[in-house]
Image: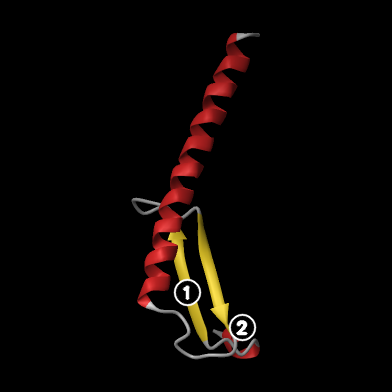
Amino acid sequence: SKSVVANQIRSVLAVPLGQKGSCDGVIYADNRVDSGAFTKADLAFVTVLAQFIRIAFRNASALARVQSERDLDSQ
């Protein structure tokens, strides 16, 4: 909250990147000009974007596991 005051942030939109109690990151946007700058449509858009990012994280993690297993098998 100190940084919000210090940076004169008037609106914040934040959506977690995670699922089932884990948080791998956050999509964060702020506005230092207008209060109430973000709408329900903005939240809906960023929430859908977060779902795509979660899928990308999950796929990247699965690919890394497969590549690691291949590396171990080839040794």
Residue 48 location, quadrant: bottom left
Foreground residue among 30 and 2: 30
Provide the secondary structure element on which disc 2 rests: helix
54 left or right, relative to 70: left
Foreground residue among 16 and 51: 51
Q: Residues within 10 Å of mark 2 (few under 14, many from 20)?
A: few
Give the residue at x 58% y 85%.
4
Colour style of the rendered protein structure: secondary structure
Name the amino acid type tagged 2.
Answer: Ser
Q: Residues within 10 Å of mark 1 (few under 14, many from 20)?
A: some
Q: Position of residue 36 (x, y in %)?
A: 44, 87
Q: CA distance from mark 2 to mark 1?
A: 15 Å
The dot on residue 34 is: none
16 left or right, relative to 3: left
Q: Position of residue 20 (x, y in %)?
A: 34, 51
Give the residue at x 53% y 88%.
10
Q: Position of residue 51 (x, y in %)?
A: 41, 52
Provide the secondary structure element on which disc 1 rests: strand
Name the amino acid type tagged 1.
Answer: Leu
Q: Position of residue 67 (x, y in %)?
A: 58, 22
N-terminal of the pair, mark 2 or mark 1, is 2
| Residue placed under numbered mark 2 in the picture | 3
| Extreme residue toward the top, this view | 74
Quadrant where the image shows the C terminus? top right
| Residue placed under numbered mark 1 in the picture | 13
Quadrant where the image shows the N terminus? bottom right
18 left or right, relative to 9: left
What count of labels does the image hold? Answer: 2
Please tell me whether residue 51 is drawn above or below residue 3 in the rendered image: above
